[in-house]
Image (tube, grey):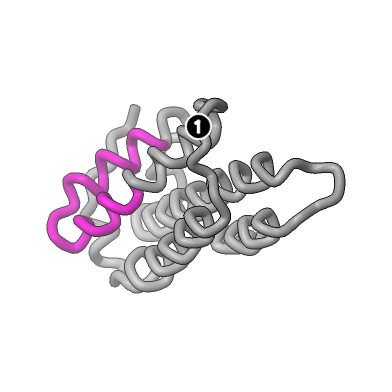
Amino acid sequence: MSFDAEEWLMVADVCCGSIPGISREALLRTSCNRAYYAALMVLKHRIDTAQGAGAVPRWGTHEALRQAVRTGGPAFKQISDKLEELRKLRERADYDLADDEFEFHRVRAMIRITRWLIRNRIKALPEAEFRRLRVPRG
């Protein structure tokens, strides 16, 4: 993978700022989206690296990753739990346009949690842990 999906957290940080002509809410919702996908794609990359390119299916990727980490045992419990929290917030950001929960401090907390999850759990686990995951093949 030439692109490190963790870089999307930098985009999420930028979206917590202000960009002329773009509403604060749109930026905060975009920030939530990028933070979630950063974690998801770093996880996908770790699995594909450990098990071979294409180990994670192109279709149904979200669900395949969710199932893989849910069955990964204690090493993946925190990843599974945090990824689920991030997914729910991302879905609210993308689909529940009446939701007014997107405040700066909450979104910044989401980014911090995502950065911690990527660096201290997803990237920190040994490759052997990712090799033993069972990823549904669609």
Of helix, strand and loop, which one carries label 1?
A: loop
| Residue kind at label 1, given as amino acid type | Asp
Q: Nearer the viewer, residue 112 or 48?
A: 112
Q: Position of residue 40 (x, y in %)?
A: 44, 49
The answer to if 70 sits in the magenta stretch is yes
Q: Which residue occupies 45% across, 55% down?
A: 39
Mark 1 burial class by Cα count in 10 Å: few <14, some 14-19, many 20+: few
Farthest residue in the left direction?
A: 73
- Residue denoted by label 1: 99
Q: Magenta part of the protein: which range?
A: 62-83
Q: Is residue 58 above or below residue 6?
A: above
Can residue 81 be seen by looking at this rendering? yes
Q: Is residue 87 above or below residue 3?
A: above
Residue at 50% x, 27% y: name it.
Answer: 96
Quadrant of the snapshot with the C terminus: top left
As for residue 124 lying within the magenta part, the answer is no
Q: Position of residue 52 (x, y in %)?
A: 40, 52
Image mark count: 1
Place residue 11 in its image quadrant: bottom right
In the rendered view of the protein, which quadrant contains the N terminus? bottom right
Work out whether 58 lies above or below 124: above
**Residue displayed at 71% across by 59% down:** 17
Q: Residue furthest right?
A: 20
From the top left corner, tell me how far across and down residue 55 is, in percent.
38, 44
Relative to 128, residue 29 above or below: above
- Residue 2 shows in the view: no
Which of 102 and 14 lies nearest the eye of the viewer? 102
Name the residue: 86% across, 49% down: 20
Q: Is residue 118 left or right of residue 136?
A: right
Across and down, in percent, residue 48 comes to 42, 52
**Overall secondary structure of the magenta stretch?**
helix
